[in-house]
């Protein structure tokens, strides 16, 4: 059962189209697994649409303008546009991981993934979004895998897509949306393997011993 959800502020920003692509993907993918948050977004979207409509109808200039529009020729212009539709039919996309084959949520099925690279138990495929300094990746953590104890210079959003992991704060299951920042320190580990979608805006910072050894991992996971 999902225990961790996006905040109401994040859901509102999502409904208003104000999030970066990487965070929009995370919220959309979470909502595919969480009817509770999807309902909230549907309600927010309906309120938003109503507000825009009310604003438009109270604007006399817009009303005058729409009255004078030549609707028929406008519709004609739209329909004769023969550029290909942007609505590409959804295709299921499964990926082979270290521990299983997993189907990606729709929100991630059409993104472009760079080549997988592997460091220890963690394999990473960056998602091509071009939003520096925000970077997003798919992380495949093999059974028994762990990420050393670290904190975050910026934020770290983890959406657990498959499997489960635990850290110093609890156990997480598929669908959990985990937002952490520099006030959190943790060391995630998985028994049976897991797939995460991670969004970070800075490198992780390792806390204990061997920090020089681990810092390359911090940069790798960012
Ligand atoms: Zn939720």
Image (cartoon, rainbow, N blue to C red):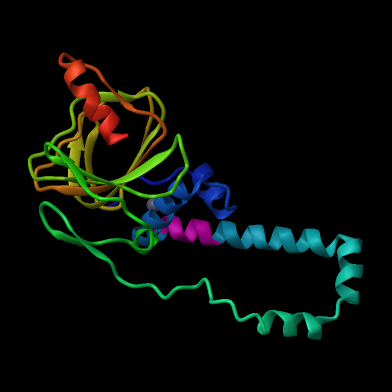
Q: Which residues are magenta?
A: 36-42
Q: Quadrant of residue 218?
A: top left
Q: Nearer the viewer, residue 199 or 14?
A: 199
In this picture, is 106 found above or below 211? below
115 part of magenta stretch: no
Q: Quadrant of residue 30?
A: bottom left
Q: Does the image show residue 123?
A: yes
38 part of magenta stretch: yes
Q: Residue at x 56, y 60 (%)?
A: 43
Q: Quadrant of residue 150?
A: top left
In this picture, is 69 found above or below 141? below
Q: Residue at x 29, y 29 (%)?
A: 219
In the figure, is residue 204 to the left or right of 20?
A: left
Q: Nearer the viewer, residue 91 or 182?
A: 91
- Farthest residue in the top direction? 209
Q: Quadrant of the C terminus?
A: top left
Q: Residue at x 46, y 42 (%)?
A: 7
Q: Nearer the viewer, residue 31 or 222?
A: 222
State the predominant SS element of the stretch in magenta: helix
Tell me residue 211's x, y (percent).
Answer: 20, 17
Q: Residue at x 83, y 65 (%)?
A: 57
Q: Nearer the viewer, residue 129 or 204?
A: 129
Tell me residue 112's x, y (percent).
Answer: 36, 56
Q: Does the image show residue 177?
A: no
Tell me residue 155's x, y (percent).
Answer: 40, 32
In the figure, is residue 1 to the left or right of 51?
A: left
């Amino acid at each position: 059962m999902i225990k961790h959800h996006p905040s109401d502020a994040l859901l509102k920003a999502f409904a208003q189209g104000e999030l970066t692509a990487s965070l929009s993907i995370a919220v959309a993918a979470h909502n595919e697994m969480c009817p509770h948050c999807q309902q909230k977004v549907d309600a927010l979207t309906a309120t938003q649409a109503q507000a825009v409509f009310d604003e438009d109808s109270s604007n006399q200039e817009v009303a005058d303008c729409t009255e004078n529009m030549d609707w028929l020729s406008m519709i004609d212009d739209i329909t004769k546009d023969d550029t290909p539709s942007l609505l590409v039919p959804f295709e299921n996309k499964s990926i082979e991981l270290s521990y299983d084959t997993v189907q990606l949520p729709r929100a991630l099925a059409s993104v472009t993934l760079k080549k997988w690279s592997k460091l220890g138990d963690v394999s990473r495929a960056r998602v091509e979004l071009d939003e520096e300094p925000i970077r997003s990746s798919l992380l495949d953590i093999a059974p028994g895998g762990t990420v050393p104890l670290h904190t975050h210079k910026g934020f770290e959003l983890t959406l657990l897509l498959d499997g489960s992991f635990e850290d110093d704060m609890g156990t997480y299951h598929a669908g959990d949306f985990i937002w952490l920042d520099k006030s959190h320190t943790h060391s995630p580990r998985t028994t049976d393997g897991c797939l995460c979608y991670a969004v970070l805006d800075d490198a992780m910072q390792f806390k204990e011993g061997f920090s020089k050894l681990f810092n390359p991992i911090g940069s790798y996971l960012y």
